[in-house]
Amino acid sequence: MFRIILWLIIIILITFFVVFNVEPKVDVHLFPGVTLQGMPLALVIILSFILGLLCGMLILLPELIRSKIKLSQLEKERSKSSASGEGFSAQDRPSS
């Protein structure tokens, strides 16, 4: 619940920032022949930041998937070894 409230506050602050900073207006050239005219500079900056975050997340996604697969494999091995009686017995465990 706290995260939702925090995200709502952040979104409201960003919205106010964009609404109250409508000047200067800039032209954004997306592709040759495709231009968005009269975009508020604050909106362009925020959208660029969000697109950068999304690109970074896409770059990290394969590593995250590999880590989760490896973790699930290790958990399966651990459950197999504990089910078969392998591992430490109470006498073999180091005392702390």
Image (cartoon, grey):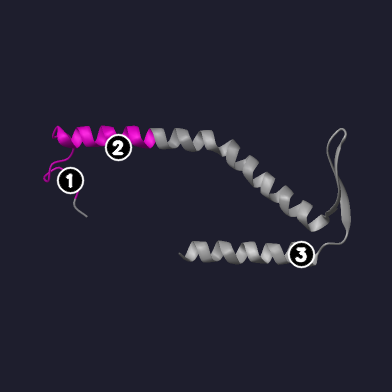
Q: Which residue is mark 3?
A: 19
Q: Position of residue 86 (x, y in %)?
A: 16, 34
Q: CA distance from mark 1 to mark 2?
A: 20 Å
Q: Which residue is mark 2?
A: 75
The amino acid type found where label 2 is placed reads Glu
Q: Secondary structure at mark 2?
A: helix
In the image: residue 19, left or right of residue 33: left
User: Pointer 2: residues within 10 angstroms few (<14), some, or many (20+)?
Assistant: few
Q: N-terminal of the two: label 2 or label 3?
A: 3
Residue under the image location 81 percent in, 64 percent down:
21
Q: Position of residue 31 (x, y in %)?
A: 83, 34
Q: Which residue is mark 1?
A: 93
Q: N-terminal of the two: label 1 or label 2?
A: 2
Is 48 located above or below residue 63 in the figure? Answer: below
The amino acid type found where label 1 is placed reads Arg
Q: Secondary structure at mark 3?
A: helix
Which region is colored magenta?
Answer: 70-94
Is 77 located above or below residue 90 in the figure? Answer: above
Q: N-terminal of the two: label 3 or label 1?
A: 3
User: Pointer 3: residues within 10 angstroms few (<14), some, or many (20+)?
Assistant: few
